[in-house]
């Protein structure tokens, strides 16, 4: 959290100053992104909610993305289009200015969709859209969770700056 908290504080200050809000849909980070954002005092001013979308059941229940919807757009695994869909859906469902998502495979092995350990896709949806893929090349589960969380928060900070 040492690296995440300063970044979360910067994001919080920006969101509060702009009177904007965020929703988070994360997967392989297991809640670390939300934990960092919520660790900042005054988080209720900008954080509306989030969920760990770890399984197809969670995807259907928490962000209302059906199996048919996934099939219709040809998504399978941690992809940039799926990350964008997650970010947009979280934003829509919680009626926020921004949505942030992360989906990937932390390790020590890949996920059931064929993504290698160390693979993650992240997206920010809102007045501006940003989507990236991160490949750490590592199978260290905890290190990947930290790296994915940090990169997702960096993407959010960069997107907020570019939306000024």
Image: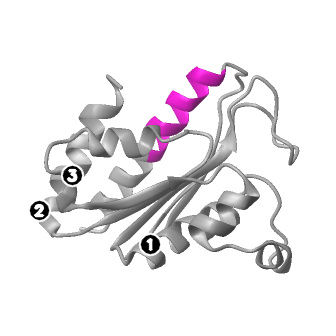
Question: Is 30 on the left or on the right of 60, as rendered?
Answer: left
At a point 37% along the width and 78% down the height, the residue shown is 95
Q: Quadrant of the N terminus?
A: top left
Residue 55 point in image, percent of width and height: 72, 52
> In the figure, residue 62 lies in which quadrant?
bottom right
At a point 52% along the width and 30% down the height, the residue shown is 147
Q: Residues within 10 Å of mark 3 (few under 14, many from 20)?
A: some
Q: Which residue is mark 1?
A: 91
Q: Which residue is mark 2?
A: 17
**Magenta segment:** 141-152
Q: Nearer the viewer, mark 2 or mark 1?
A: 1
- Indicate whether 85 appears above or below 131: below
Query: Is 147 contained in the magenta span?
Result: yes
Residue 136 point in image, percent of width and height: 65, 29
At a point 72% along the width and 60% down the height, the residue shown is 57
Q: Main secondary structure of the magenta part?
A: helix
Rounded to the nearest angstrom, the CA distance separating label 3 from label 2 is 13 Å
At a point 67% along the width and 19% down the height, the residue shown is 140
> In the figure, residue 61 lies in which quadrant?
bottom right
Q: Which residue is mark 3?
A: 43
Q: Earlier in the sequence, mark 1 or mark 3?
A: 3
Q: Earlier in the sequence, mark 3 or mark 2?
A: 2
Q: Nearer the viewer, mark 3 or mark 2?
A: 3
CB-based contact (under 8 Å), mark 2 and mark 1? no
> In the figure, residue 126 lies in which quadrant?
bottom left
Q: Secondary structure at mark 1?
A: helix
Q: Earlier in the sequence, mark 2 or mark 1?
A: 2
């Amino acid at each position: 959290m040492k690296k995440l908290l300063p970044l979360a504080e910067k994001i919080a200050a920006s969101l509060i100053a702009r009177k904007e809000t965020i929703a988070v849909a994360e997967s392989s980070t297991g809640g670390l992104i939300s934990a960092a954002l919520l660790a900042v005092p005054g988080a209720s001013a900008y954080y509306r909610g989030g969920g760990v979308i770890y399984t197809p059941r969670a995807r259907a229940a928490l962000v209302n993305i059906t199996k048919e919807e996934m099939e219709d757009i040809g998504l399978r695994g941690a992809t940039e289009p799926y990350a964008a869909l997650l970010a947009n859906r979280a934003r829509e469902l919680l009626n926020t200015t921004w949505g942030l998502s992360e989906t990937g495979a932390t390790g020590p092995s890949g996920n059931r969709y064929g993504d290698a350990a160390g693979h993650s896709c992240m997206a920010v949806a809102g007045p501006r859209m940003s989507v990236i893929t991160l490949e750490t090349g590592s199978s260290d589960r905890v290190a990947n969770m930290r790296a994915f969380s940090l990169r997702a928060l960096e993407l959010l900070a960069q997107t907020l700056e570019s939306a000024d």
